[in-house]
Structure formats: structure tokens, C-alpha cells
Image (tube, rainbow, N blue to C red):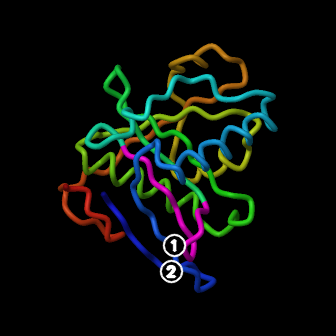
Amino acid sequence: MPTSAEPLRDGATLRLRAVPYDDPVAQHLVERVQQEYVVRYGGRDEAVVEPADFAPPSGVFLVAEVDGVAAGCGAWRLLASGEVEIKRVYVEPAHRRRGLAQRIMAALEDGAAHAGHRSVVLNTGQEQPEALVLYDRLGYRPVPGYGVYADAPDAVFLGRELAQRDGTDDEKGISWVS
């Protein structure tokens, strides 16, 4: 499983590690994501998610730990259409505004590129303005809707092309070859 550790600007250490989707830490963070959706949208995410969707080589689920404390997560999975979808990007409130979401996104994109994928898509919503700003800064642009929210009026579908990797170690120290 890929892992990496890097310092944050405040001296704390960020560690990204891949875990199974049904890992207890992953499930705790997924539940925190779902509660965020309840607050912002009035309900849980209705998109179908199977733990096997995030198992290598067709996906990954990353947990971000700051000094050993679970601080966030993110994942990617291969859709039936052949597209790679980024899911469950979340940072705990106490750890926000430290650049964790950007680092999680970079690791997810690197992993998808190492797996040979050329682009990624994601679905977010108007009630997540900070996510929309992040995705815009990362170069995400509108793409056609898909899945359960394809026709939802407040749904936002974004995507971007990825730089291709050679499948070995990247600049973040994560090895995506098992």
C-alpha cells in the first residue's frame, strides 16, 4: 500500500496512507463526510459506493494523518464508463486551511496517473464553495454530468487531464507499484 510522509509548514507531519475502504479509520472519515453532506445538503450522498471500488489496481482510498491523527481522506475509483472518479475528499474542521485537501488531491491524481489514466472527474455541489475554489485552482473544468446526480440542479461536475507518470516513485515519495 502506498504511504508518504511530509512536513507541513507548521512543523506537523502529514502522512498519507492507502487503506481498504472498509478499514475502521476510513469508515470513520466516510461517516464524517456523510455528516458534512447532511449539514450542507440535508441528506447523505446517494451515490452507490462498494468497498471493492477502491481496491488497487482499479482504485485507492487514502487516509491523511497529521502527527498520527486521522485528519482527512480521499479516494479514486474506476467507473464502468472507464473514467476515473475522485470521491470522498474530506478534511476534518480542525485541520482545514493547512493545505491538506490540495495534498490529498495531488496524491490521488498521481495515483490515477501512475495507474495509466489520462484524466479524472468528480462531482461536488454548490453548497461546497471551498471545494469549488480548490478544484478551480487545480485546473478542474466543467464536464458532462454522470451517475445519480447527473440531472441534479445544484450538482457540479468537473474534470481535468493528468500528466502521465512512469509508474515508479513520484516526487511525493509514494510508490504506486505493488
Crowd around label 1: few <14 · some 14–19 · many ≥20 (10 Å): many
Q: Give residue 47's position: percent from left, percent from top.
A: 56, 24
Image quarter of residue 55: top left
In this view, the residue farthest toward the top is 151
> Taking 155 as reference, is 94 above or below it?
below
Q: Give residue 25's position: percent from left, percent from top.
A: 54, 54
Q: Give residue 14's position: percent from left, percent from top.
A: 51, 72
Residue 7: give its label.
Answer: 2
| Figure quadrant of the C terminus | bottom left
Residue type at mark 2 is Pro
Q: CB atoms at circles 1 and 2 under 8 Å apart?
A: yes
Q: Residue at the spot x=58%, y=81% of the render?
A: 12
Residue type at mark 1 is Leu
Decide which of 129, 43 is in the foreground and name it.
43
Which of disc 2 and disc 1 is earlier in sequence?
Answer: 2
Q: Residue at the spot x=40%, y=46% of the render?
A: 20
Residue 14: give its label.
Answer: 1
Image quarter of residue 81: top left
Image quarter of residue 4: bottom left
Decide which of 159, 59 is in the foreground and name it.
59
* Residue 127 left/right relative to 111: right
Q: Secondary structure at mark 2?
A: strand
Q: Give residue 73's position: percent from left, percent from top.
A: 54, 53
